[in-house]
């Protein structure tokens, strides 16, 4: 492996270590023992859930190829997963508000375990069922757990600012450290023990089962709107009305879809971008480096959210602009660096520059996740939280399906340019959200001032 990869990984490790050690009292939030116990319980469960997800990721495509399926058939399987998340996942995920978030989290575990079991079959129909189940599980993972956390946090009367601490730690562990360890563990099972590409899916099922046991033994149930006279259609209608009547919620949904759409597109594009001439690149090590950059981002986010200034709505504008610029590097390098025509070999100069940009983008992803969670906890109404969060994923899944279907139709630079434009638009919408939030905050303050001035007159 070239020294460049070790250099980048080592530098990021040193920065993450330094950022964590250099935190002062201003960067830390004083909490209670009861909250720490609650937070740690959630982090254990969330880490187990993410381990079940991360273990599968690197081996899905590889498993399908070992069963003899071609690129077209594999593409259809992936589209089925995102389509399932959009259609069935939205319905199942939305039921969490009415039937209970804890129950939805358990459903996620069962659904994903069943999806893992289908990977033992080489039959296309069985694998398709597995992808449909996986799509449903994905919707539950990214809505039900967060909805349960926010509701339970508020029900127990914890300080609202402490929620940002749980969010940032969850991303630091679940989307960073656990992702790296899962990649190494999966590689250990497949390459070292020679257990085959289905072994990581069996390991994922075990982690999910352990997490489900912790949920059943230690979590209490909470609901959004448990009223008996409100059916699913009424729930959808209420969520749609909430989005249409509150510009802040609509903006938040658009921002999330634009960023996550760019993020998932990047997942498909980074490999051909770094190896356009079939250069030999260590995919697993690069993935671990990206996750380390994401850990750095979540660590930075925890410091930002621990302070009253700057506000999340303010600094996220800069994050979107930086992420947009980082995804422009493939276009810039195509003009400034002469492309190599030699097949194979090590990573090129253009690839090195792009990888640094991609690490920057992953750091922005690490900042994005806890920050968007914080904003969702502020702006999305509790009674329809899971439903609205799954509504946000509909345009995202449509976008990803379109990209997957047309991934070979456009040059890679065009795809990165499109993502960069989306991120600029996200920054503009974030600015609009900040203006509206500040305006409402000012109006509330002025109303309190008028009430205080009127009190002596009433005495």
Image (tube, rainbow, N blue to C red):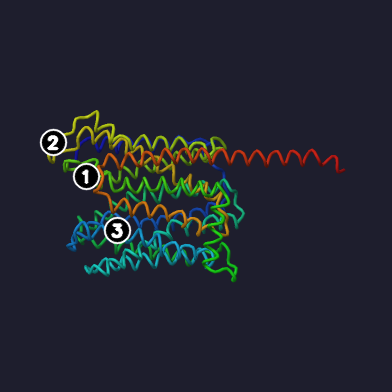
Spatial CA span between label 3 and label 2 = 32 Å
> According to the image, label 3 marks what residue?
78
Q: Is residue 109 above or below residue 327?
A: below
* For marks 1 and 3 on the same chain, the one whose residue lies earlier in the sequence: 3
The residue positioned farthest toward the top in the image shown? 336
Label 3 Cα crowd, 10 Å radius (few <14 / some 14-19 / many 20+): many
The image quadrant of residue 358 is top left
* Residue 365 appears in the rendering: yes
Point 33% across, 66% down: residue? 115
The residue positioned farthest toward the right in the image shown? 459
Asked if disc 1 and disc 3 are in contact, CB closer than 8 Å, the reply is no
Spot occupied by residue 250 in the image (x, y as percentages of width and height): 51, 49
Spot occupied by residue 191 in the image (x, y as percentages of width and height): 20, 55
* Residue 218 appears in the rendering: no
User: SS at mark 3?
Assistant: helix
Spot occupied by residue 222 in the image (x, y as percentages of width and height): 55, 63
Query: Which circle, 1 or 3, is nearer the viewer?
Result: 3
Please state if 146 lies on the left or on the right of 357 as rendered.
Answer: right
Label 1 Cα crowd, 10 Å radius (few <14 / some 14-19 / many 20+): few
User: SS at mark 2?
Assistant: loop
* For marks 2 and 1 on the same chain, the one whose residue lies earlier in the sequence: 1
The image quadrant of residue 21 is top left
Please state if 433 lies on the left or on the right of 404 as rendered.
Answer: right
Asked if disc 3 and disc 2 are in contact, CB closer than 8 Å, the reply is no
Q: Nearer the viewer, residue 435 or 174?
A: 435
Q: Is residue 249 above or below residue 70?
A: above
Tell me the number on the disc at residue 397.
none
Spatial CA span between label 1 and label 3 = 23 Å
Query: Which circle, 2 or 1, is nearer the viewer?
Result: 2
> According to the image, label 2 marks what residue?
341
Spatial CA span between label 2 and label 1 = 20 Å
> According to the image, label 1 marks what residue?
282
């Amino acid at each position: 492996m070239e020294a460049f990869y070790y250099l980048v990984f080592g530098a990021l490790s040193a920065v993450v270590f330094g950022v964590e050690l250099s935190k002062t009292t201003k960067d830390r939030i004083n909490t209670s023992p009861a909250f720490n116990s609650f937070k740690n319980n959630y982090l254990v469960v969330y880490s187990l859930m993410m381990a079940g997800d991360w273990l599968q990721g690197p081996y899905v495509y590889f498993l399908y190829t070992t069963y003899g399926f071609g690129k077209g058939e594999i593409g259809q399987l992936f589209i089925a997963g995102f389509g399932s998340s959009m259609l069935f996942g939205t319905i199942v995920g939305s039921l969490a508000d009415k039937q209970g978030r804890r129950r939805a989290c358990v459903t996620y575990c069962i659904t994903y375990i069943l999806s893992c079991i289908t990977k033992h079959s080489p039959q296309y129909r069985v694998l398709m069922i597995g992808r449909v189940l996986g799509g449903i599980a994905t919707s539950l993972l990214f809505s039900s757990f967060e909805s349960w956390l926010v509701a339970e946090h508020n029900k127990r009367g914890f300080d609202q600012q402490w929620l940002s601490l749980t969010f940032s730690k969850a991303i630091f562990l679940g989307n960073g450290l656990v992702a790296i360890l899962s990649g190494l563990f999966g590689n250990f099972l497949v390459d070292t023990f020679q257990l085959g590409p289905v072994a990581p899916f069996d390991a994922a099922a075990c982690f999910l089962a352990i997490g489900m046991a912790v949920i059943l033994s230690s979590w209490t149930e909470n609901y959004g709107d448990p009223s008996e006279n409100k059916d699913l259609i009424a729930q959808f209608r209420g969520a749609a009305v909430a989005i249409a009547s509150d510009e802040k919620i609509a903006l938040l949904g658009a921002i999330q879809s634009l960023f996550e759409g760019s993020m998932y597109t990047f997942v498909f594009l980074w490999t051909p971008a770094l190896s356009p001439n079939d250069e030999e690149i260590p995919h697993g090590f690069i993935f671990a480096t990206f996750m380390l950059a994401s850990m750095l981002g979540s660590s930075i986010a925890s410091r930002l959210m621990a302070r009253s200034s700057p506000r999340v709505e303010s600094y996220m504008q800069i994050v979107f602009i930086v992420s947009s610029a980082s995804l422009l590097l493939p276009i810039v390098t195509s003009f400034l660096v002469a492309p190599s025509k030699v097949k194979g070999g090590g990573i090129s100069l253009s690839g090195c520059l792009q990888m640094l940009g991609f690490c920057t983008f992953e750091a922005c992803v690490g900042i994005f996740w806890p920050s968007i969670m914080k904003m969702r906890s502020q702006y999305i109404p509790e009674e329809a939280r899971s439903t609205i969060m799954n509504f946000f994923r509909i345009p995202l899944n449509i976008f990803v399906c379109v990209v997957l279907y047309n991934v070979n139709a456009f040059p890679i630079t065009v795809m990165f340019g499109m993502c960069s434009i989306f991120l600029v638009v996200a920054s503009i919408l974030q600015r609009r959200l900040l203006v509206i939030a500040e305006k409402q905050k000012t109006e509330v303050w002025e109303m309190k001032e008028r009430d205080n001035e009127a009190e002596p007159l009433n005495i």
